[in-house]
Image (tube, rainbow, N blue to C red):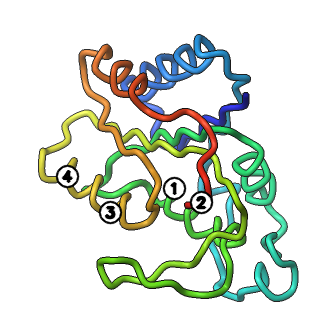
Amino acid sequence: MKALLISDQEYMTRTYQGLNDLTGKFLKQKGFELELMELSAENLTFCKGCFGCWIKKPGECVINDRMTQINRSIMNSDVVIYLSPIIFGQFSPTFKNVIDRGLPNMLPFFETRPDGSTMHPPRYDTYPGQIIIGYGEETSEEDKQLFIDVTKKHRRSIEVLIYQEPTENTIMALNKMELGRLGGLL
């Protein structure tokens, strides 16, 4: 089984280093083959909104940058874990870009969610399980809850954790999660 660990290299704090080590060890102990991607805004272009990923090259972004490899690695993994700093209750701009640029993995139609919002339906039968772990040095409870709410709005099937000491809490939460591919949800 394959696991992909994605982090934002622009926020490599001591907390991040501890979380990265903890998560990597956890995945290896669970028997996953681990791929690590440390991303930055410098090696990712922002989505142009051209819909070329639906019209010109269905399922693949027309921008030739690192996102092509990221999307392939995501879709070829069984589980993807994102390590994101919490910035004013949101994920980092780099992660927002990765989420936006994941558009080729969805179909160019809309479906209405039970809450009345719309989302693109899945392109594929299965997707990797996705977990995002937010971290920060001094994050308020309000920012933590906002991070959870915003993240859940972007991805229906994503699990959201907030990293905090003691580390055993994060390990216990990860042990309770489904670490494998999921049917038809993104």
Residue at x-position 19% and y-position 37%:
138
Marks 3 & 1, CB-CB < 8 Å contact: no
Amino acid type for the residue under numbered disc 3: Val
Give the mark toward the camera: 2 or 4: 4
Q: Which of 59 and 20 is in front in this view?
A: 59
Marks 1 & 2, CB-CB < 8 Å contact: yes
Residue at x-position 66% and y-position 82%:
48
Within 10 Å of disc 1 (Cα), the crowding (few <14, some 14-19, many 20+) is many
Amino acid type for the residue under numbered disc 2: Val
Determine the CA span between mark 2 and mark 4: 21 Å
* Label 1: element kind: helix
* Label 2: element kind: helix
Number of numbered markers: 4
**Considering only order in the chain, which callout, 4 or 2, is on the residue closer to the N terminus?**
2
Within 10 Å of disc 4 (Cα), the crowding (few <14, some 14-19, many 20+) is some
**Considering only order in the chain, which callout, 4 or 3, is on the residue closer to the N terminus?**
4
* Label 4: element kind: helix
Residue identified by numbered label 2: 98
Image coordinates of residue 169 in percent, x first then y, are 28, 20
Q: Residue furthest top?
A: 29
Residue identified by numbered label 3: 150
Image coordinates of residue 42 in percent, x first then y, are 65, 56
Is residue 88 visible from the viewing direction of this image?
A: no
Image coordinates of residue 70 in percent, x first then y, are 73, 51
